[in-house]
C-alpha cells in the first residue's frame, strides 16, 4: 500500500508541475509571476523525484523527471530558450507519468 501511495503522490506532483509549467509558458505573465510558477514546478518535480527515489520505485520514471528538473532550473535562471525548455520539461513529465502508469 505504501508504494501505491507514493506513486499516487508522484503522479499528483507531476500534474501540479505540468500545470505550473503551462502557466509559466503563458505570454500573459510578468517576469515575477513566471518565476513563481517555475519555482513551484521545480519544487513539485523535486518532490516527485524524492518520493520515488526514497523507496527505490520506478527508476525509469525518475530519469525523465531529473532531466525535467534540470530544464526547469535553466528556464528559471535564464530567458534564453525558456519557452523551449518549458515545453521539453512538460514532455518529460508526461513521459514519467506514462512510465508510472505502465509500471503499476
Image (cartoon, helix red, strand yellow):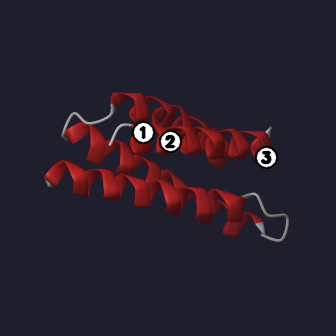
Q: Do labels 1 and 2 touch, CB within 8 Å?
A: yes
Q: Percent from the top left, x then y, of residue 55?
A: 18, 40
- In the depicted view, which residue is nearer to us: 26 or 101? 101
Relative to residue 49, is residue 42 depicted above or below? below
Q: Percent from the top left, x then y, of residue 36?
A: 60, 65
Horizontal side, residue 86 vs residue 58: left or right: right
Relative to residue 50, is residue 64 depicted above or below? above
- State the residue lying farthest toward the left: 1
The mark found on residue 98 in the picture is 2
How many C-alpha atoms fall within 10 Å of the one at disc 2: few (<14), some, or many (≥20)? few
Quarter the N terminus occupies: bottom left
Q: Which is more N-terminal, label 1 or label 3?
A: 3
User: Would you name the residue on which mark 1 appears?
Assistant: 102
How many C-alpha atoms fall within 10 Å of the one at disc 1: few (<14), some, or many (≥20)? few
Residue 5 shows in this picture: yes
Q: Distance from label 1 to label 2 (Cα)? A: 6 Å
- In the depicted view, which residue is nearer to us: 49 or 5? 5
Quarter assignment of residue 43: bottom left
Q: Residue at x 48, y 54 (%)?
A: 14
Q: Single out the mark in the foreground, 3 or 2.
A: 2
Q: Distance from label 3 to label 2 (Cα)? A: 23 Å
Q: Helix, strand, or loop for circle 1?
A: helix
User: Would you name the residue on which mark 3 appears?
Assistant: 83
Q: Residue at x 57, y 44 (%)?
A: 94
Q: Percent from the top left, x then y, of residue 97?
A: 48, 45
Quarter the C terminus occupies: top left
Amino acid at each position: 500500500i505504501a508504494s501505491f501511495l507514493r506513486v499516487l503522490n508522484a503522479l499528483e506532483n507531476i500534474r501540479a508541475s505540468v500545470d505550473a509549467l503551462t502557466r509559466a509558458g503563458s505570454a500573459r505573465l510578468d517576469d515575477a509571476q513566471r518565476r513563481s510558477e517555475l519555482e513551484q514546478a521545480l519544487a513539485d518535480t523535486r518532490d516527485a523525484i524524492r518520493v520515488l527515489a526514497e523507496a527505490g520505485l520506478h527508476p525509469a520514471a525518475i530519469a525523465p523527471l531529473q532531466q525535467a528538473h534540470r530544464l526547469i532550473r535553466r528556464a528559471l535562471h535564464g530567458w534564453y530558450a525558456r519557452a523551449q525548455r518549458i515545453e521539453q520539461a512538460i514532455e518529460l513529465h508526461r513521459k514519467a507519468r506514462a512510465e508510472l502508469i505502465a509500471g503499476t
